[in-house]
Amino acid sequence: MRKFKASHVLIIERNFLTFASQFGTFSILQAMHIPIATPVFWKEYELIDCGNFEKLERFGKNITLRPEPQALWERSLSAKAWQELAHATFRREKNNPEKGIWETKKSFTSKWILPYQSPQLNLIFKLSLSSFKHVGIFPEQAYNWEFIAEQVKNLPPKPKVLNMFAYTGGASLAAKQAGAEVTHLDSVKQVNLWARENMELSHLANIRWITEDALSFAKRELRRGNQYQAIILDPPAYGRGTNGEKWILEDNLLELLKICQQLLAPRQSFLVINLYSLGFSVLILENLLKAIFPIAKTLELAELYILDRHQKKLPLGISGRVIL
């Protein structure tokens, strides 16, 4: 171990840049390499450009322009080019920055379907413009769909998979298509109905639908003694359950992960968690998963991104995988 005397030290190790400020002795410890990861099989989705806190994306025949808080840099194309390309543009409400309205051109295709195909998956999603800027899919999550499908196929037949905060069901469909018995949970009934449409479009059936608060459901499953071979989590920074239960990521995540550890089968099982919250470090997730799953066979961490046409990498959350 090397030691330094200084008041300010700039440490560069591998691909990490750390600034340390302290009077006294410094120690450089070996940095952990955190990989970055992106899906590779998208054909009908692409990130055209990003910057100036916005992103320009193509979902099939439609091109959308919407806010993106992580795109701090300047766009590559001109603002005029963005406006000419976009079929739908999201405008924030002045009094509520979390909501807004979409302005669409006549060329916007209202019947909006997006296929996803890879060597092991063949899924179809219905898309729609929501007042919260979302369109019904998070394209970067295809990276996890592939992992889920592969892991399900490696488990004994018909493994039980629980997908919480499941939104419109990309991970649920991937698990089902790979042969799992899937429980899909989201606290919003309309979102679950949307996920069911995606199931039917993908020519799948028999997913179990639960409209409930995730933490409440997990506690009840634990009391019942139920177990799963896989658990998938994509919790928001903030949310509300069906009975007004408050979800705050930093307050509730530790408790939920501890319950998930007990719900998972002790062998031949896995957990996938994705977090998209500004300021939530991959090191926080690493510490949580190492503490809760100390005997895991494999623990993988990655920062997810999408590459635009101009080779800019847009960060879109962090992912953790545990294999028991």
Image (tube, helix red, strand yellow):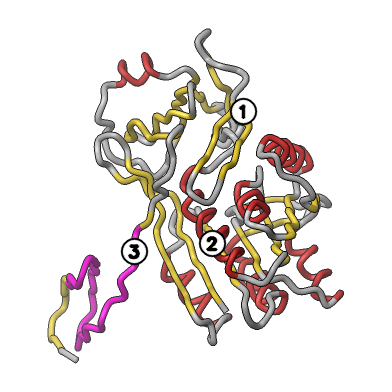
User: Residue furthest toward the left?
Assistant: 5
Q: SS of the residue at dot 3? A: loop
In the foreground, 260 or 18: 260
Q: Label 3, label 1: how many angstroms apart (C-alpha)?
A: 32 Å
Above/below status of 91 relative to 8: above
Residue plotted at (49% across, 66% down): 320
Residue annotated with mark 3? 35
Q: Label 3, label 2: how many angstroms apart (C-alpha)?
A: 20 Å
**Residue 71 found in image quarter:** top left
Above/below status of 239 relative to 83: below
Residue annotated with mark 2? 150
Q: SS of the residue at dot 1? A: loop
Is 182 part of what is drawn in magenta?
Answer: no
Q: SS of the residue at dot 2? A: helix
* First in sequence: mark 3 vs mark 2: 3
* First in sequence: mark 3 vs mark 1: 3
Choose mark 3 or mark 2, whichever is in front.
Answer: 2
The residue segment tinted magenta is 11-36
Residue 8: give x, y in percent of width and height. 16, 74
In the foreground, 211 or 73: 211
Is 22 part of what is drawn in magenta?
Answer: yes
Is the N terminus in the top left, top right, bottom left or bottom right quadrant? bottom left
Residue annotated with mark 1? 128
Q: Is residue 293 left or right of residue 279?
A: right
Total number of numbered discs in the rendering:
3
The dominant secondary structure in magenta is strand
Residue 134: give x, y in percent of width and height. 56, 35
* First in sequence: mark 2 vs mark 1: 1
Q: Amino acid at mark 2?
A: Glu
**Residue 224 found in image quarter:** bottom right
**Residue 162 found in image quarter:** bottom right
Above/below status of 266 relative to 249: below
